[in-house]
Amino acid sequence: MNIRSLRLRLLVGAAIAILISLAVAWSVMTVLFQRHLERREIQELDRQAVPLIAGLQVDAKGRLSVTAQPPDPRFTRPSSGLYWQISSEHGRMRSRSLWDQELPTAHADAGDEHNWHNRTVAGPFEPELLLLERRLKIAGGHDVLIQLAEDQAPVRRASAEFGYELFLFLTALWLVLAGAAAVQVQLGLKPLTHLRDALRALRLNPSERLTVAEHPPEVEPLTRAINQLAETREQDLARARRRSADLAHGLKTPLSVLAAESRQLRARGDAAVADGLDRAIAAAGAAIEAELARAKAAAARQSITPQRVPARVVAERVIAVVEHTEAGGKLAFDIEVPGDLTVPGSPEELSEILGALSENATRFARRLVRICGTRDDKSVRLTVEDDGPGLDDWDAEQALVRGRRLDESGPGHGLGLSIARDLVEARGGAISLKRSGLGGLQVEMVWPLA
């Protein structure tokens, strides 16, 4: 797909935007889930602290004792990951799970006796503990620091598992949303496809116009601008064709007068002046014919979908005329075109194409001129070939240049091949020159069926 494609840009933009949004959502949801687990852990530690505080006693000497311990059996199993510790100026008590270790009390900012505070510290057996602590004043005015701690490894594992499963889910969701975005882009650009079809009809018919009501309001300014451009183009083309045709037809009368003057000069014996005048008249006549051919090609380009012309009928008609020329009377002509083979255009256009190519082949052929026609699934072809000297690759390329003559000694003005090319290309075809199987030049014309 073209990197400048609007569809590609929209699809890539949507996919990236969705991916970034889901990545942010994954990060935020993972953090929120971890905080939720930590809050649940704090609540559980707070619940475990209730019987511990309720059973806390101090004797007359200020020594601490606990009459009731939390019911969780992990407090009695060494290095279980769940611990409690009570500290005062007279000593320290701890759960069996701490064994011979202690919870850190340095830098403990436990605040007032009405609030619990939590922090994360390195544990005696674990890399990380969640520590919940609170300072209390008990009977006798003794300060007591109560601490409960739980290993953070299960929380971290649960958070990692949740993050992984959430990643899989959001990846699948990204694929679904990207597909939905592709469908949305396809539906959103569908009006542009209708606009393209309308433009194709406009290209085939200069009088066609885009219907504003059939297109979304977002492209209404574009359709109006295209209609204005088409209106201006049609008017310019009509004026140009009219002026060229008027000029060509207007010059025919002066050329006829000059031809009559040339005949009179020749009759009076002034042959040199008459020859020069005849050459000028012939050049002007060729220019006029070329201008008329260009007008025909322009009309062909702007016409509605062309009709199909039976190629064999037109080829027989053209050969019937060429056979009666001085050069054509000495040659054999072979037409190998199926009767049902048709090419796009009008009979006049195909007659002009085959006429120019047949006259050119007749000038250089030794014995035979052949016209062939074939058709396959993709295109229709016509070839005009002869058994003359032919052309090399460079001369074949130059022969299609307007006004370029490869044989300066013969008649003509080098316009036949280029005019044929204009008319073929006007109907969407292509023309090429190559070496013929007969030994001479082969001119091949190809029109696509689509």
Image (cartoon, rainbow, N blue to C red):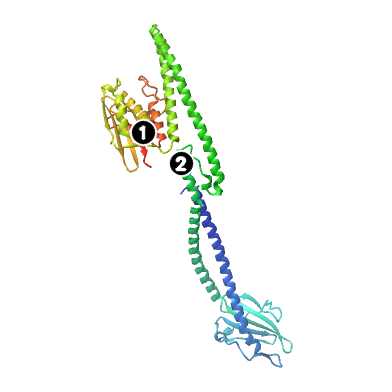
Question: In the rendered structure, which amino acid carries the disc numbered 1?
Answer: Ser
Quarter containing the C terminus: top left
- Between 365 and 145, the one nearer to me in the picture: 365
| Residue 67 x %, y % | 63, 91
Q: Earlier in the sequence, mark 1 or mark 2?
A: 2
The CA span between labels 1 and 2 is 28 Å
- Between 170 and 98, the one nearer to me in the picture: 170
Residue 122 in view in this figure: no
Q: Is residue 4 left or right of residue 444?
A: right
On screen, residue 305 above or below 142 = above
| Residue 260 x %, y % | 41, 12
Residue 421 in view in this figure: yes
On screen, residue 127 above or below 60 = above
Query: Can you identify the residue that label 1 sits on?
Result: 432
Question: In the rendered structure, which amino acid carries the disc numbered 2?
Answer: Ala
Q: Is residue 266 left or right of residue 373?
A: right
Q: Quadrant of residue 304?
A: top left
Who's the residue at 53% across and 38% down the image? Answer: 229
Residue lying furthest bottom = 60
Secondary structure category for the residue under label 1 = strand
Q: Quadrant of residue 269?
A: top left
Question: Are there few (<14), some (14-19), or many (20+) residues within 10 Å of tag 2?
Answer: some
Q: How many marks?
A: 2
Q: Quadrant of residue 268?
A: top left
Residue lying furthest top = 268
On screen, residue 191 above or below 282 = below
Q: Is residue 326 left or right of residue 291?
A: left
Secondary structure category for the residue under label 2 = helix
Query: Can you identify the residue that label 2 sits on?
Result: 201
